[in-house]
Image: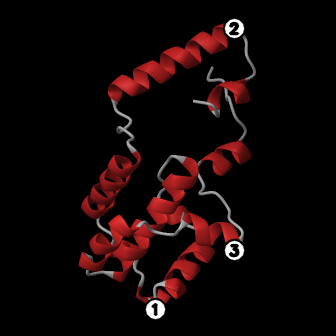
Amino acid sequence: MRTELISKSQQIEFDSPPKFSLVERRMIFEIPDGFKLYLKKLESPTSIVGFILQYGYFKSSGKFFYVNVFNSEDIAAICRWNEIDKNMIDWKNYHRSTLHNQQKIIRTYFGVRPFLENEKVMVFSEATRLLKKQKRPNNICFPL
């Protein structure tokens, strides 16, 4: 029998981008000068908004999120600040290769390695160790 470590609502919260106030949103999605030239090279409004969203979400939470959970208020604000018509955003045209390339650029900027098999083994080992100590599940999952 599989044990559920976190509730369904906690799983949804974990898989969703953080929620920001207007002031926080402005600070989180402020792009460093080093990325501005890169953004000018992007041809698609979707790629521009996607990059800014991924940058801000990673800056805030240390992880990336699926396009289908991007916050509509964040999208609208980024479009407004960058003078992009939000009706031009089409996530079907945000190709997987573009998404992964942008994530690599963002990880490199923040000095973070990708989460590969070695890292999975380390996290699983640590979670197993903590579970054997009978720690509370929430105290195991969220810090990892």
Image position, residue 88 (x, y; %): 41, 88
**The N terminus is located in which quarter?**
top right
Image position, residue 122 (x, y; %): 44, 19
Q: Is residue 6 left or right of residue 126?
A: right
Determine the residue positioned at 35% across, 37% down. 113
Tell me if mark 2 has few (under 14), some (14-19) or many (20+) residues whose alpha carbon lies within 10 angstroms of its own: few
Task: Work out which residue is located at the far front of the displayed protein and give it.
Answer: 33
Residue annotated with mark 2: 133
Residue annotated with mark 1: 85
Q: Earlier in the sequence, mark 1 or mark 2?
A: 1
Image position, residue 104 (x, y; %): 31, 51
Q: Is residue 55 left or right of residue 25?
A: left
SS state under label 1 = loop
Q: Amino acid at mark 3?
A: Leu
Residue annotated with mark 3: 22
Image position, residue 18 (x, y; %): 64, 57
Q: Is residue 126 left or right of residue 131?
A: left
